[in-house]
Image (tube, grey):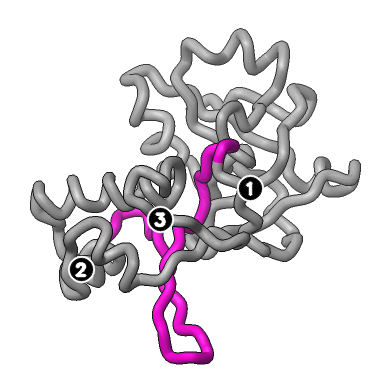
């Protein structure tokens, strides 16, 4: 993986904002599954295909997916993280998660999480990680004091909760009730 330049990081953030939250700001319309033609995105954001490929290939979280359609055109979408205001069906099949998943969050959120569980807030799903280091990174984006929660995913499945795994390995579910959470002590 090659480190992105400052300009490429800015472009990656703009792509993320457009594909996850506000496609209309770039004059784009996502299809029902969140895809948009690569050519349209390149034009809208004044990027070259080489710049886009560098960003997609070297994004630290594999935030974007590119797929070739039967007509030979390439389409792009965000792998997950869409705002509720962007109606998208990622068309991900239900998947059986590992027994335990993890969620990193600012420690200041623990009281409300203990009362209410994990909710998607402004997004479509709660995002969960496969391991503690990833959860720490995710939680650390918003605070230096990070709490890691262990999620009893297998128990949730037994109780009827549905999980999906995005193309970049992030686990998604509608909510995580408080009874399935435990603060992970390192």
Quarter of the view holding residue 177: top right
Element under label 2?
Answer: helix
Question: In the drawing, does residue 164 fall left or right of residue 184?
Answer: right
Counting other residues with Cα less than 10 Å from the Cα at mark 2, is it few (<14), some (14-19), or many (20 or more)?
A: some
Left or right of 4? Residue 45 is right
Residue most extreme to the bottom: 71
Whether residue 39 sits left or right of residue 21 in the image: it is: left
Which residue is pictured at 43% across the width and 90% down the height?
Answer: 72
User: What label sits on residue 28 in the rendered view?
Assistant: 3
| Spot occupied by residue 13 in the image (x, y as percentages of width and height) | 27, 45
Q: Which mark is residue 172?
A: 1
Residue 73 percent across, percent down from the top left: 41, 84
Q: Quadrant of residue 77?
A: bottom left
Q: Secondary structure at mark 3?
A: loop
Closer to the eye: label 2 or 3: 3
Of residue 73 and residue 131, the one placed in the foreground of this image is: 73
Q: Which residues lie in the magenta part?
A: 58-85
Helix, strand or loop for disc 1: strand
Question: What residue do we see at 27% from left, 58% from top?
Answer: 44
Inter-mark Cα distance, 2 to 3: 22 Å
1 and 3 marks in contact (CB < 8 Å) = no
Q: Tell whether 46 sits left or right of 84.
A: left
Q: Would you call the spot at circle 1 few (<14 residues within 10 Å), some (14-19), or many (20 or more)? A: many
User: Picture quarter containing residue 49?
Assistant: bottom left
User: Which tag, 1 or 3, sits closer to the chain's start?
Assistant: 3
> Is residue 67 part of the magenta span, yes or no?
yes
Q: Nearer the viewer, mark 1 or mark 3?
A: 3
Quickly name the residue at label 2: 54
Q: Main secondary structure of the magenta part?
A: loop
């Amino acid at each position: 993986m090659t480190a992105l330049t400052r300009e490429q990081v800015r472009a990656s953030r703009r792509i993320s904002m457009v594909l996850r939250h506000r496609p209309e700001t770039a004059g784009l319309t996502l299809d029902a599954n969140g895809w948009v033609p690569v050519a349209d995105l390149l034009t809208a954001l004044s990027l070259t295909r080489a710049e886009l490929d560098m960003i997609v290939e070297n994004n630290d979280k594999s935030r974007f997916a590119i797929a070739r359609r039967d007509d030979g055109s390439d389409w792009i979408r965000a792998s997950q993280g869409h705002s509720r205001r962007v109606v998208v069906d990622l068309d991900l099949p239900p998947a059986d998660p590992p027994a335990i998943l993890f969620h990193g969050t600012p420690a200041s959120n623990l009281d409300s999480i203990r009362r209410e569980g994990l909710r998607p807030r402004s997004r479509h799903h709660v995002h969960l990680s496969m391991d503690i280091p990833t959860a720490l990174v995710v939680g650390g984006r918003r605070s230096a004091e990070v709490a890691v929660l262990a999620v009893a995913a297998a128990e949730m499945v037994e109780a009827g909760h549905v999980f999906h795994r995005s193309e970049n390995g992030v686990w998604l579910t509608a909510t995580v009730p408080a009874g399935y959470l435990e603060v992970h002590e390192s």
